[in-house]
Image (cartoon, rainbow, N blue to C red):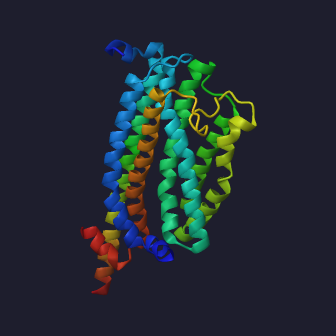
Amino acid sequence: MWTWFYKLASPPYVYGVAAALMPWFLGLAVLTIGYGLIAGLGFAPPDYQQGDAFRIIYVHVPSAWMSEFIYTTMALAGGIALIWRIKVGHAVAAASAPIGASLTLLALVTGSMWGKPMWGTYWAWDPRLTSELILLFLYVGVMSLRSAFEDPARGDRAAALLAVVGAVNVPIIHYSVVWWNSLHQGATVAKLGKPSIAGSMLWPLLSMFVGFMLFYGAVLCLRLQGEVLNRERQSAWVREAIKS
Amino acid sequence: MSGGSFWYMGGYARYVWPCVGFACVVLAWNLWSARRHLAAAKVRAARALAMAASEAR
């Protein structure tokens, strides 16, 4: 297992795997997001309370899930890089941050657009909305901190530390609707074994979620190749990688 | 759902379609910026290799 772990941490191996996986991730992401959008916007029945406004769920919920998932990935990668001094961990964290920040912004904007017809306001200082906004600030903080140091290695370590500390916000976002009184609705899909959403609405949503995961994989592979090249540009293997 | 009611979205079109549009913009930006990031890294790496080769000579 450790051999595999160390092989995974090798920059040329990561560069090669990322280059090979990217087209597969992207192709499958286009298919699953395409199906999710067509089925969700065109064929799922309207909600009995929210009417067709509920269809915002097909872009809002996957982006909100991914904002938490990507932050967790970034914090884990940063933690691994700090503990085991694995440079690829910093590269994964650096590559994930802009993707996570953009999807957090998407979750906030679409949530705000959904809030207006349902709550009568674009924004409320509600626990779920506020903790999601803090997540966006954490992403921006991690990216800014990384680029604030002249020595990239110090920037990587500082950003990883902030990412690890900021991970405390992820369970707060997730459980905010349980712990506090909230305008935001509670769990719909993630109630173990008993989602309170009809199958005809659920399948497009799950397809969108898988699509967003695959899309993250594709963009991560592209950005990771760039991050690895930036960190290894003096290495001999980079010459061959650039030629191909 | 007929063509007209699909675009009308039960009166919520001005909320639903901007969300879908913004999602497409965010996904497209991610792909574009990641490709640009990789291309820039390749140029920087090629430059560093060329400089190292000229110094070796």
- Left or right, residue A207 beside residue A188: left
Q: Residue furthest left?
A: A244
Residue B22 position (above or below residue A89): above
Q: Position of residue A45 (x, y in %)?
A: 45, 20
Q: Residue at x 50, y 73 (%)?
A: A1
- Number of callouts in the render? 0
**Quadrant placement of the C terminus of chain A:** bottom left
Residue sitting nearer the eye, A111 or B2: B2
Residue at 57% from the left image edge and 33% from the top image edge: A195
Of residues A194 and A26, the one nearer the viewer is: A194
Left or right for A105, reference B1 = right
Confirm whether residue A106 shows in the render: no
Quarter occupied by residue A121 = top right
Measured as percent of width and height from the top left, residue A27 is found at 31, 47
Residue A46 coordinates in the image, percent (x, y): 47, 18
B52 w.r.t. A130: above or below:
below
Q: Is residue A231 above or below residue A18?
A: below
Expressed as whole percent of the image width and height from the top left, the position of residue B37 reads 38, 56
**Nearer to us in this view, A36 or A79:** A36
Tell me: A38 left or right of A106: left
Which residue is pictured at 52% across the width and 31% down the height? A110
Q: Is residue A10 visible?
A: yes
Looking at this rendering, what residue extends furthest in the front direction? A193
* Residue extending furthest toward the right: A180
